[in-house]
Amino acid sequence: MITFSPETHEYKKDGLVIPSVTQIIAEAGLVGGDFSFVPSEVLEKKRDIGKKVHLVCVLYEQKKLDEDRLNPVLAGYLESWKKFVKISGYVSEEVEKIYYSERYHFAGTIDTVGIKGKGKTIIEIKTGTKKISDQIQTAGYELLYNENNKDKVKKRLAVYLKENGDMPTIQEHKDKTDSPVFLACLTLMNFKKRRR
């Protein structure tokens, strides 16, 4: 059985720490850019907003959100998510589900999987700007999902929510080499671990 600790952001299986999709990508050096010029308190505030927006969208999808008590800073992002759902016809089937790959020995929590058009779609909810690592991240989640489910994923999307409530930017990840790139990141991470 897989467990996850939000405090340490660690997945464990039978007491052993399992690498996550985002850790694997970060270890390969594909995450973000140089933010050394940004004050640490600004970065922390952005991270905090991102986590809270994600939680708000998850609670909304689970029909557990009390919108009357929602912080106004988060309301625009939620409105942006609602616009995406309404216009795209997306229907969420799973929210924040943890998956483990027995084959490749890694884990991750997929933001949401559902139906958009004629097939299963993985969606990664974002509040920042597009990064190359986003498409590698959804490829890792696709590997996890497809290994554990009969119905295979047809689409991978990153949905970049807008603070002002506008329609989000939607990026479909279609590159067939994304999965091999993710697996190369995993191989590199494992190689580095053996060298330490």
Image: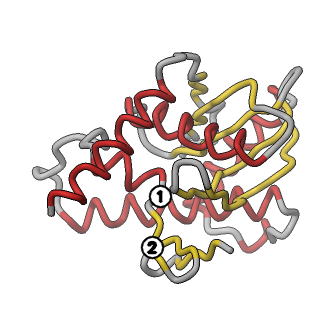
Q: Quadrant of the C terminus?
A: bottom left
The tag on residue 17 is 2
Residue that badge 1 annotates: 20
Q: Please, what secondary structure does the residue beneath circle 1 have?
A: loop
Q: How many marks?
A: 2
Three-letter code, disc 1: Ser
Q: Position of residue 67 (x, y in %)?
A: 78, 65
Q: Position of residue 39 (x, y in %)?
A: 16, 61
Three-letter code, disc 2: Val
Q: Position of residue 32 (x, y in %)?
A: 29, 42
| Snapshot colouring | secondary structure
Q: Position of residue 130 (x, y in %)?
A: 42, 31
Q: Please, what secondary structure does the residue beneath circle 2 have?
A: strand
The tag on residue 61 is none
Residue plotted at (38% across, 58% down): 46
Mark closer to the observer (2, 1): 2
Residue plotted at (58% across, 41% down): 161
Q: Is residue 29 above or below residue 67?
A: above
In 3D space, how far apart are the residues under numbered discs 2 and 1 (Cα atoms)? 9 Å
Residue plotted at (63% across, 30% down): 157
Q: Are marks 2 and 1 in contact (CB under 8 Å)?
A: no
Q: Is residue 102 above or below residue 178?
A: below
Name the quadrant containing residue 141: top right
Q: Quadrant of the N terminus?
A: bottom right
Residue plotted at (53% across, 75% down): 12
Answer with left or right where residue 73 lies relative to residue 193.
right
